[in-house]
């Protein structure tokens, strides 16, 4: 009788353990990953950018106003990582100047089509300016930190602007030879923005991390 009871007890224990295993198996790994992400344990850090273009005439009146998102480039992401963890290492990944801030705004006038993450320069850069009015909005909760910076350009002739880039070198930059001197965080092409010799163009760039 004792032997029979022991066997029954063992069977109940095995069934209970098996039920626990089956219960755990009913929760797929993907669900666990989703739940983990929902609790904020695992969330990717993203870099996104937004550009605002405003053209003013000689009287300061707005002639054109345009907004667009931008493409963040591989070399820009490599520079951010290198600048964050060891800015003394130049040439890491796709980054050549990890010790230089991204404060150069470039414009160009030869739209070669959609930008891919592997791009390294504008198709035809025509001007570059040091960014001014650099402002940081601190991260808060689920909202990442935002850095905004802008530059203003003037012109001596009428032309169309259809590409822009945010790079980490201005003083060493040379128009037409951007690749040798600057790493681009982001570049974007867009529909032509016409300007004349009496116009000014303000480019306002906002980068969000997180």
Image (cartoon, rainbow, N blue to C red):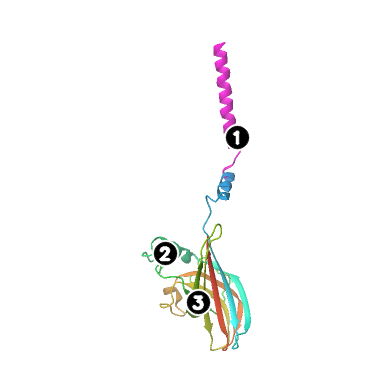
Q: Earlier in the sequence, mark 1 or mark 3?
A: 1
Q: Give percent across and percent down for residue 56.
A: 59, 83
Q: Secondary structure at mark 3?
A: strand
- 174 or 4, nearer to the observer: 4
Magenta-colored span: 1-29
Is residue 123 found left or right of 99 in the rendered image?
Answer: right
Residue highlighted by disc 1: 23
Q: Number of numbered discs present?
A: 3
The answer to whether residue 14 is seen in the rendering is yes
**Label 1 to label 3, Cα distance in Å?**
58 Å
Density class for disc 1 (Cα within 10 Å; few <14, some 14-19, many ≥20) is few
Question: Which residue appears at 58% of the width and 27% of the height?
Answer: 16
Label annotation for residue 83: 2
Label annotation for residue 106: 3
Q: Secondary structure at mark 1?
A: helix
Q: Secondary structure at mark 2?
A: helix
Residue that sits furthest to the top in the current view: 1
**Label 2 to label 1, Cα distance in Å?**
47 Å
Density class for disc 3 (Cα within 10 Å; few <14, some 14-19, many ≥20) is many
**Label 2 to label 3, Cα distance in Å?**
21 Å
Q: Give percent across and percent down for residue 49.
A: 55, 67
**Cβ–Cβ under 8 Å for marks 2 and 3:** no
Q: Earlier in the sequence, mark 2 or mark 3?
A: 2
The quarter of the picture where residue 30 lies is top right
Give the quarter of the figure containing the N terminus: top right
């Amino acid at each position: 009788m004792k032997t029979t009871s022991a066997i029954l007890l063992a069977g109940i224990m095995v069934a209970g353990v098996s039920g626990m295993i089956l219960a755990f198996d009913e929760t797929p790994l993907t669900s666990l990953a989703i739940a983990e992400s929902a609790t904020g344990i695992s969330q990717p850090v993203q870099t996104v950018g937004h550009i605002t273009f405003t053209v003013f005439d000689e009287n300061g009146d707005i002639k054109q106003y345009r907004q667009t998102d931008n493409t963040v480039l591989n070399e820009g992401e490599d520079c951010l990582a290198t600048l964050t963890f060891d800015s003394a290492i130049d040439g890491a990944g796709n980054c050549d100047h990890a010790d230089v801030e991204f404060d150069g705004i470039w414009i160009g006038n030869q739209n070669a089509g959609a930008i891919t993450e592997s791009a390294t320069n504008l198709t035809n850069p025509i001007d570059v300016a040091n960014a001014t009015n650099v402002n940081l909005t601190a991260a808060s909760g689920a909202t990442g930190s935002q850095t905004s910076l802008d530059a203003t350009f003037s012109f001596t002739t009428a032309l169309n602007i259809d590409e822009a880039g945010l790079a980490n070198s201005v003083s060493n930059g040379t128009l037409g030879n951007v690749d040798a001197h600057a790493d681009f965080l982001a570049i974007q092409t867009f529909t032509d923005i016409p300007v004349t010799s009496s116009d000014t163009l303000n480019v306002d760039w906002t980068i969000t991390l997180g």
